Image (cartoon, rainbow, N blue to C red):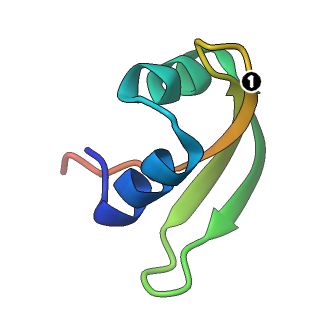
C-alpha cells in the first residue's frame, strides 16, 4: 500500500510502482528509523530502479495481528 506522500514523491522522482518494487526486492536496508508520530520502525532501502538509477525507498511493515 502506498501513501499519498509516497505517490507524490514517486511522481516528483519519475518512479513507477515496478521500480519501487524492484528496489524493495533487490536493494539493501541501509538504516532503520523510528516514525516520529507512531514510533513504528521505518526501513530505508537503497537500490536501483528497473530503469537502472539509484534511489532510496522508505517502508513500514504492518502487523497482521
Left or right for 34, reference 11: right
Q: Does residue 28 appear in the picture of this structure?
A: no
In the image, farthest residue toward the bottom: 37
Q: Nearer the viewer, residue 14 or 4?
A: 14
Name the residue located 44 percent from the left edge and 48 percent from the top edge: 11
The residue located at (62%, 21%) in the rendering is: 49
Q: Nearer the viewer, residue 40 or 9?
A: 9
Relative depth, front residue between 49 and 57 = 49
Q: Is residue 21 above or below residue 63?
A: above
Residue 11 shown left or right of residue 30 in the figure: left
Which residue is at 62% across, 50% downward? 43
Give the quarter of the image for residue 23.
top right
The spot of residue 14 in percent (x, y) is: 52, 38
- Residue at the spot of label 1: 53
Dot 1: what SS? loop
Residue 45 place in picture, x, y as percent? 68, 39
In the image, taking residue 28 as reference, residue 12 lies left or right, namely left
Q: Quadrant of the N terminus?
A: top left
Label 1 neighbour load within 10 Å: few <14, some 14-19, many 20+:
few
- Vertically, is 15 above or below 64? above
Furthest residue toward left: 65
Amino acid at each position: 500500500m502506498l501513501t499519498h506522500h509516497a505517490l507524490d514523491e514517486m511522481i516528483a522522482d519519475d518512479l513507477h510502482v515496478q521500480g519501487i518494487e524492484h528496489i524493495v526486492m533487490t536493494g539493501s536496508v541501509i538504516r532503520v528509523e523510528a516514525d516520529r508520530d507512531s514510533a513504528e520502525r521505518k526501513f530505508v532501502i537503497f537500490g536501483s530502479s528497473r530503469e537502472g538509477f539509484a534511489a532510496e525507498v522508505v517502508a513500514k511493515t504492518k502487523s497482521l495481528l
